[in-house]
Image: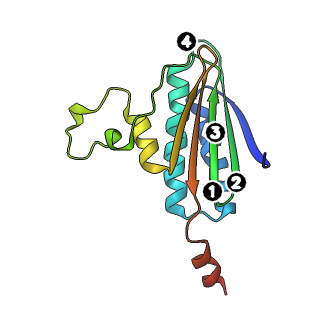
Amino acid sequence: MNPYIGLTIPAQAEYLDIVRLTLYGVASKAGFSFEDIEDMKVAVAEACNNAILHAYEQGQPGTIEIQYEQQDGFLQISVKDEGNSFHYVQAESDTVALHHKSISEAAVGGLGLFLMQALMDDVQVLTESGKGTQVVLKKQLTGQMNRKEEMV
């Protein structure tokens, strides 16, 4: 396992700024573009929001663990809760697309996952009955050669 930066936050919306700020620091240090960082911030915030809204019963305390790990030219971000998990079935990429469909054809509650898939290069949702949910997001670092050439 590569070294990683990890956070454990209360499952409350007011802590999302810490998640986004940490992501900005890790991703900018790794060389990601501003646009890629903004995409990742939206995707990670959506994964955290899902945990905040759905993992724990109303009024019950809970936590969210976030790990940022740089590996082989990409950044992997893991968002894990210990709350209520759900049955997730990985859809084929062509069935996920909402192109040429009206908004009424989108599954209720499924837009967050669609958004994460649209913004990230890979999204995996791992669930264990009664043991929480883990969302693993990956973003490839592109344009490394161009940035190095510009610096010379």
Of the residues tagged 4 and 1, which is closer to the observer? 1
Which comes sooner in the sequence, label 4 or label 3?
4
User: Please, is residue 47 above or below residue 23 in the view?
Assistant: above
Q: In the rendering, which numbered label is found on residue 70?
A: 2
> SS for tag 2?
strand
Name which residue lies at 21% across and 31% down: 104
- Amino acid type of the residue that numbered disc 3 sits on in the rendered structure: Ser
How far is disc 2 from disc 3 in space, using C-alphas? 11 Å
How far is disc 4 from disc 1 in space, using C-alphas? 35 Å
Q: In the rendering, which numbered label is found on residue 57?
A: 4
Can you give x and y, in whole percent of width and height, for residue 121 in the image? 50, 51
Are discs 2 and 1 less than 8 Å apart at CB? yes
Can you give x and y, in whole percent of width and height, for residue 73 in the image? 65, 61
User: Please, is residue 91 above or below residue 121 in the view?
Assistant: above
User: Is the image coloured rainbow, by chain, by secondary structure, or in one colour?
Assistant: rainbow
What is the number of callouts on the image?
4
Q: Which residue is mark 3?
A: 78
Name which residue lies at 63% across and 44% down: 77
Residue 30 occupies quadrant: bottom right
Residue 59 occupies quadrant: top right
- Amino acid type of the residue that numbered disc 4 sits on in the rendered structure: Glu
The residue most toward the bottom is 152
Q: Which residue is mark 1?
A: 74
